[in-house]
Amino acid sequence: RKKWFIETTAYYKFVNGISSRNQGFQNQFQFVEAIGSYTNYGLELAVNKKWGDFSSWISYTYAQNDYEFPSLVPSEFPNNLDIRHAASLAGSYTLDRFKIALGINWHTGKPFTLPLSDGQNASNEPADPILYDTPNSKRLPDYFRTDLSAEYRWNVSEKIDAKINVAILNILDTDNTLNIRYARLETENGSTRINQIEQQSLGLTPNVSVQVLF
């Protein structure tokens, strides 16, 4: 209506019969075989407005995603992919064959599991399992990324078009932590310590591509 588009969706999803072995656990359940389920419910809202050659989008999602494995302790805890809040803002401008767009993405951090204190994890064997705290009880820092892209399309012949795309991902060069896991590291005196391993997203990343369409 009058170049406004508004959509909202509420959803509820229940999946039964999943295996703990293929959920990507990196904590006390990494090598455990258990059958359980997950429940995912939430709300999505999207708003789009157009002004001539300019178009803008804003969206927000609230979601709660939890596991239940009756044979594990505890039996209920957050899903590895549980992102409670996510929002995005985007705008694009089109002028003849040229198009430019800017997008901002933000979401709260995914859950991860901390190991117990060094005293409780004391060991002289690198192969000994790490003792963990409550599963998925901690959260990664919030994720934030801004992207810029541009596109130009032209006619090569009557039946062939060409298009060049230029994009700069994470133009603010924001540091985003995608995952945290832990491993034992042997020290010089023969004992071990718990080493934290962080997986970081790419920083400022340019991309250029050319397409031929026929």
Image (cartoon, helix red, strand yellow):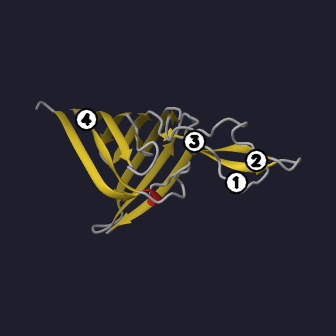
Q: Earlier in the sequence, mark 2 or mark 1?
A: 2
Spatial separation of the CA atoms under disc 2 and disc 4: 46 Å
Q: Nearer the viewer, mark 3 or mark 1?
A: 1
Q: Determine whether, in the image, residue 113 is placed left or right of residue 120.
A: left
**As shown in the figure, which amino acid type bears the numbered disc 4?**
Leu
Most extreme residue toward the right is: 189
User: Given contact means CB atoms under 8 Å apart, are the residues at marks 4 and 3 in contact?
Assistant: no
Q: Nearer the viewer, mark 4 or mark 1?
A: 1
Spatial separation of the CA atoms under disc 2 and disc 3: 41 Å
Q: Earlier in the sequence, mark 3 or mark 1?
A: 1
Residue named by callout 4: 43
Give neighbour class at mark 4: few <14, some 14-19, many 20+ (Cα, 10 Å): some
Residue 149 drawn above or below residue 3: below
Residue named by callout 1: 128
Residue named by callout 2: 123
- Given residues 171 and 179, the one toward you in this image is 179
Quarter of the figure with residue 172: top right
At mark 3, the secondary structure is: loop
Spatial separation of the CA atoms under disc 4 and disc 3: 32 Å
Q: Determine whether, in the image, residue 84 is placed left or right of residue 32.
A: left
Q: Nearer the viewer, mark 2 or mark 4?
A: 2
**As shown in the figure, which amino acid type bears the numbered disc 1?**
Asp
**As shown in the figure, which amino acid type bears the numbered disc 3?**
Leu
